[in-house]
């Protein structure tokens, strides 16, 4: 008889490291904010974490960055490594350790280009690895639990015992361990003692054609900027962006709007000018929940429930064709 830990039935979970606070080091274990992110290797982050029965963990360092500095190159590399590992029959899923600051952008990007039928689970920590009571190890253990759950699929983010969909997640707190929310959609589920309690279906979707990202050696990422509407706004920022300087021509513009997609009239006038000059313009609400409800005659299209940072990624992918 074959037992559950025999090589025939062993499954792998590949843990890709990208840096973040989860890999951060501080000079003192009392210090939860004065640390340097992205110092500890992903293999070391797995030390002391017991894999579920029949599961082998494998670590791969894809990047080592503070996620405020996340780059398109790292995204491209991550997407490629996910494709590589998920194609292996014995790989149950991929876990990605990441900084909290842009985890929602990376998750949305991976959701958009992969929409995987196996789980890709991002996780993070609000305290550095050197903290008296770090949250990283439990988050990684929970993420592995999600990656090995029967039927799990799509891109999710696991933090503080909550499973968020990669499309819905937003960082909503600067300090609390449970720093994320999923807005109106709510979480996908919870991890309790290694078991997932699902409260809505796993994320699904259709990946955008991403051959340019997954196969091309170098991607010419279109320049897309975000400009916020606010009291006393003017068109000056958009006018300056159109001059482009050394940063390359502006291809897209996301307007972070007030409320239900509204714009200061001066900003709107400049945005219409940019659109008429060939820039792709889209509105995304700066409200943390809800979506823009379109109205007949709206002069500029809207991004629905996408936040400005996610609308930017969607627009970049659209412009990449
Ligand atoms: C980062 O995003 O890399 C640093 C902050 C964090 O992970 O909480």
Image (cartoon, rainbow, N blue to C red):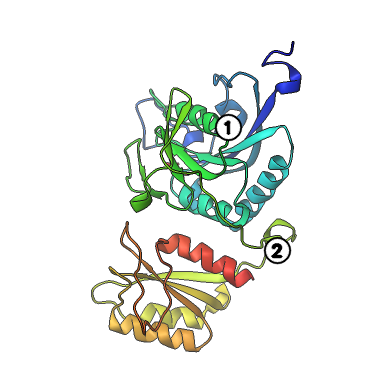
Label 1: few (<14), some (14–19) or many (≥20) C-alpha neighbours in 10 Å: few
Residue 294 higher or lower than 141, as above or below: below
Q: Residue furthest left?
A: 231
Q: Residue at x 34, y 78 (%)?
A: 295
Q: Measured from the top left, where is residue 221 in percent x and y?
A: 61, 67
For disc 1, the marked residue is: 150
Q: Quote the CA–CA distance across marks 2 and 1.
A: 32 Å
Q: Measured from the top left, where is residue 170 in percent x and y?
A: 39, 50
**Secondary structure of the residue carrying numbered label 2:** helix
Nearer to me, 257 or 291: 291
Q: Measured from the top left, where is residue 127 in percent x and y?
A: 40, 33
For disc 2, the marked residue is: 212
Residue 69 higher or lower than 16, as above or below: below
**Secondary structure of the residue carrying numbered label 1:** loop
Q: Is residue 129 visible?
A: no
Instruction: Tell me if the residue at label 1 has its CB under 8 Å from ligand 1.
Output: no
Nearer to me, 296 or 37: 296
**Image-based side of 317 in relation to 31, left or right:** right
Q: Quadrant of the N terminus?
A: top right
Ligand 1 position by quadrant: top left
């Amino acid at each position: 008889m074959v037992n559950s830990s025999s090589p025939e039935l062993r499954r792998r979970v590949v843990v890709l490291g990208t840096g973040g606070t989860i890999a951060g080091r501080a000079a003192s274990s009392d210090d939860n904010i004065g640390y340097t992110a992205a110092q500890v290797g992903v293999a070391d982050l797995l030390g002391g974490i017991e894999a579920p029965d029949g599961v082998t963990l494998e670590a791969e360092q894809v990047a080592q960055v503070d996620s405020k500095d996340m780059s398109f190159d790292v995204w491209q590399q991550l997407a490629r490594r996910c494709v590589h590992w998920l194609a292996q029959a014995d790989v149950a899923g991929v876990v990605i350790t990441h900084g909290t600051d842009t985890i929602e952008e990376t998750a949305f990007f991976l959701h958009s280009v992969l929409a995987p039928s196996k789980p890709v689970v991002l996780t993070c920590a609000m305290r550095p690895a050197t903290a008296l009571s770090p949250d990283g190890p439990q988050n990684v253990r929970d993420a592995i639990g999600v990656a090995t759950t029967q039927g799990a699929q799509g891109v999710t983010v696991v933090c503080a015992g909550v499973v968020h969909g990669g499309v819905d997640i937003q960082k909503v707190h600067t300090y609390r361990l449970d720093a994320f929310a999923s807005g109106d959609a709510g979480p996908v589920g919870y991890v309790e003692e290694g078991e997932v309690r699902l409260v809505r279906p796993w994320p699904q979707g259709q990946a955008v054609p991403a051959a340019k990202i997954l196969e091309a050696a170098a991607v010419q990422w279109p320049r897309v900027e975000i400009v916020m509407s606010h009291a006393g706004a003017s068109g000056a920022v958009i006018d300056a962006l159109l001059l482009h300087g050394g940063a390359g021509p502006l291809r897209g513009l996301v307007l972070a709007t007030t409320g239900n997609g509204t714009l200061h009239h001066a900003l709107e006038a400049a945005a219409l000018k940019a659109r008429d000059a060939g820039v792709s313009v889209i509105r995304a609400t700066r409200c943390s929940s809800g979506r823009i409800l379109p109205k007949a005659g709206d002069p500029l299209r809207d991004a629905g429930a996408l936040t400005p940072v996610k609308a930017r990624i969607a627009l970049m992918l659209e412009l990449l064709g």
